Image: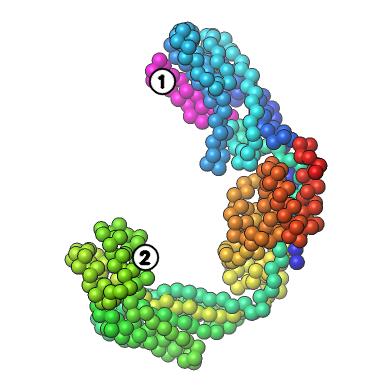
Amino acid sequence: MKKILYILFCLLPVLGGKAQTLYRSQIRVDNESITRSDDNRLTIRMELILQENLKLASNNVATLTPFLESQGKTKVLPAIVIYGRKRQLINQRNHQNPEGTYTIIRHKRHENQKIDYLIQLPYEAWMRQADLKLNVDMCGCCDVVEESSGEMITKLNIELLKLHPAIAYITPKAEGVKHRAVEGSAFLDFPVNKTIIYPEYRRNSAELARIRASIDTVRNDKNTQLTGIKIHGYASPEGGYANNTHLAKGRTQALVDYVTSYYNFDHNLISSEYTPEDWDGFRKFVESSSMDKKEEILRMMDNQKVNIDIKEHNIAKLIGVQAYQYLLSECYPALRHSDYVVNYTVRGFNLEESKEIIKKRPQLLSLQEIYLVAQSYKPGSEEFNHAFQVAAVMFPDDPIANLNAAAMEIQKGGDLTNAKKHLAKADPKAAETINNLGVIALIEGDMQAAKKYFDAAKAAGLKTQADMNLIELKKKKNYPAN
């Protein structure tokens, strides 16, 4: 089931801004106007008035450089160059006038000088709410005397074209059974070569409490049903492999026995496995470290032809006593761990229940239940947007969750960065994904790309929305009817 949402993008341009003074009240900006035209060009108009109190020595030059700044991007605009009397004569004599400037004028002392600034440039989406700023550079014959960097002129609020794009959502399918899991790792301490758990030994009390808390979260919730617990124990690589096998197996079984006894669980509820030596964890530690001879260590680890006990001995010999002690204290303790997974199922919820649960335990909801919560609110409302954001967090790799989150971000307007990130995780072949990419292109003014997307979405089966969006394209004066 698909949902179409029509939205109106219509934001006013900046017109007739209030006069303001910059650079210690020596430069005034007045009558600024920033608009976007149908042919996707940005027009910037403003008056720059050099006040009579502007201090510019005869040998100096002032460079006024407007620029746009937003989202980590900058567009430098043509500069205005103002010469002192002597500096202008020297530069003319030496033919040193800078190129690519908007205008070059000579400073006149004790009077106001007005510069009508008017430029056009290709519009880019990031410019829509950019800051228009002015950089003032006062320079002597050789060195910079003073610089004022980036004083604000105005914030743009560029008019987006009056569009009614059809944004596509997808209604997720219901989950037959809602399977969920709580995962964690415990780092239990055992006396050397022992496989008995002593609850009060070192940090064991806190580690066992962490495991029980994970289980209790499920057991104490009337909406959930515990279905199984999996425990996977690991030992670290130091010592002989045979002894580590004994330790990993015994310590894993000790934890299984502890949980079974503590809760009086049926033995069939808990399954277990063990890994004698956690070489995967060892490798990750070395990869992320700054250890000497790291590459040699990794090559030794990857050599499958060498006996595992000899391999560990060779690594210890290669790195030396001090580095090996570092591994024993900083790496190996973390490799002795017990990973656990508490599996459970969750009952279904009606709409009113879902609207309460999404606030406290959204992980209990299905993607469809979250979607129905969103649909119960007005499109564009805080609750509507929040529901789709929650869905993307709870189901971060789900194509439908990301498709709908992207659609919501497009509807919000403003920065489309998040929408693009979500669409990158949606099904690239889905007609809804293709259509929404076209809507982004349409908003950003890339008409050719938008048409390709809408044609492709129509071919993929999303005829209604694609046709509506193609009609929006034809409304553009600069876009050909065919």
Q: Is residue 378 visible?
A: no
Report whether 24 appears left or right of 18: left
Quarter where residue 70 is shown: top right
Please provide percent x and percent y for residue 320.
19, 64
Please provide percent x and percent y for residue 458.
76, 56
Residue appearing at x 43%, y 22% in the figure: 146
In magenta segment, residue 368: no
Residue appearing at x 75%, y 66% in the figure: 1
Disc 1, SS: strand
> Which residue is identified by label 1?
145
- In the figure, 399 relative to 83: above or below? below
> Which residue is identified by label 2?
284
Q: Decide whether the magenta segment is chiefly helix, strand or loop.
A: strand
Please provide percent x and percent y for residue 348.
67, 77
Direction front: furthest residue: 305
Specify the label residue 404 is tagged with: none
- In the figure, 346 relative to 434: above or below? below
Please provide percent x and percent y for residue 262.
43, 87
Report whether 399 appears left or right of 310: right
Disc 2, SS: helix
Residue range corresponding to the magenta coloring: 133-153
Badge 2: residue crowd in 10 Å (few <14, some 14–19, many ≥20): few
Q: Label 1 amino acid?
A: Val
